Image (spheres, rainbow, N blue to C red):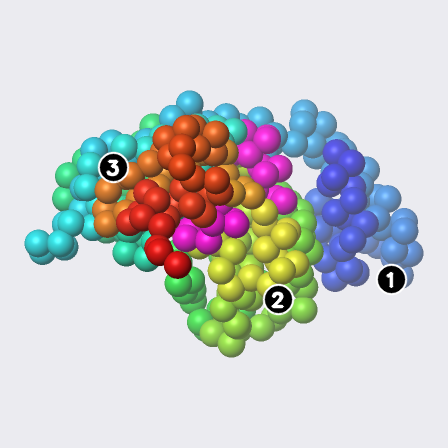
Amino acid sequence: MNSVKNIVKRMDNDELIRLARQLDVSLTERKVKRDLLVEIIQGELEEHYREGIPWKKTRLNDLAIQISGLTKKFGKTVAVRGLNLVVRPGQIVGLVGPNGAGKTTTLRILAGIIRPTEGSVQVNGFNMSVHPLKAKQRLGYIPERPTCYPNLKVREYLTFIAKIYRIPKIDATLRMKEYVDLFQLNGLLDAYIGTLSKGNLQRTLLVGIFVRPPPHILALDEPIYGLDPRGAWSLKVLLKKLRDEGSAILVSTHILEVAEGLCDRFVIMNEGDVVGRGTREELFVQTPNAHTIEEIFLELTGGIPEA
């Protein structure tokens, strides 16, 4: 409850009035001191959440992400071959490999954008081919090349996302404020999405994911790329916090520093095949001649180049 109270304290006057109306707080006086309004709203929220904050109660299936025998062919080209991968609650798994390894194809299949040639993907127990809406409802996906509705303002997009995921207005208002602050989007809420830089578009899509209640099931394709150092730091800290609270996170990247500093386990791909998997320590056992994660990666994906 203290975190909710702190969110209220950070709200500007317009946001406070909007939240007061959602809580049916009677504003009979023409002028109300800000401190008094904050206190009234905090009291109303205590009553509203007297049985606990709802987004602290949900649980995930033990196999939050399950990819089984996944193969994808484009004509005669095999982009992914026989991939098996599991992400459980409380894990960040790194899908690592050079460009063209099959990482983005895997995440696009997981998100239901393209269909596999063989195999299956399940999100929280729902098969993406059989129950696509239920699977997509539970998955938060950020593509490698983020796109969005260019004619919507940032605020309109976030409100739209909250509505289609049926998030109660009060919850949506509080969560939107929390993550807009975290990713420093306050000055861009009334900007059109079509005018945003790649980094600010990435921030907007991330807030759209986190408006939904945790624990999350996330599939993030190169999520750090495009973010400035502060945004990248905020995201990495948040992902670790969410993992510790029970979220299941799959991160695709070819940036080894990101993978090593963020992930608990690794699946290394090369030309559509899995060439290594395990924790950092397990990968060193598999490649005894390697001394760094970079050397492991190079050895498993074609060998260490000669000087």
For residue 83, which numbered disc appears in the image? 3
Where residue 99 sits: x, y (%)? 32, 57
Left or right of 124: which side holds 83? left
The mark nearer the N terminus, 3 or 1, is: 1
Q: Give the magenta range.
A: 237-259
Left or right of 57: which side holds 132? left
Is residue 38 visible to us here? yes
> Going by the picture, which residue comes out furthest to the bottom?
195
Q: Going 79% across and 60% down the picture, which residue do you hit?
A: 13
Badge 2 vs badge 1, beta-carbon distance below 8 Å: no
Image position of 126 with respect to 103: above or below: above
**Amino acid beneath label 1:** Arg
Q: Going 59% across and 55% down the picture, which residue do you hit?
A: 232
> Going by the picture, which residue comes out furthest to the front?
307
Secondary structure of residue under mark 1: loop
- CA–CA distance between discs 3 and 1? 63 Å
The mark nearer the N terminus, 2 or 3, is: 3
Q: Is residue 132 magenta?
A: no
Q: Going 35% across and 44% down the picture, which residue do you hit?
A: 299
Q: Which residue is nearer to you in this view: 274 or 171?
A: 274
Q: Which residue is mark 2?
A: 189
Q: Which residue is nearer to you in this view: 74 or 166?
A: 74
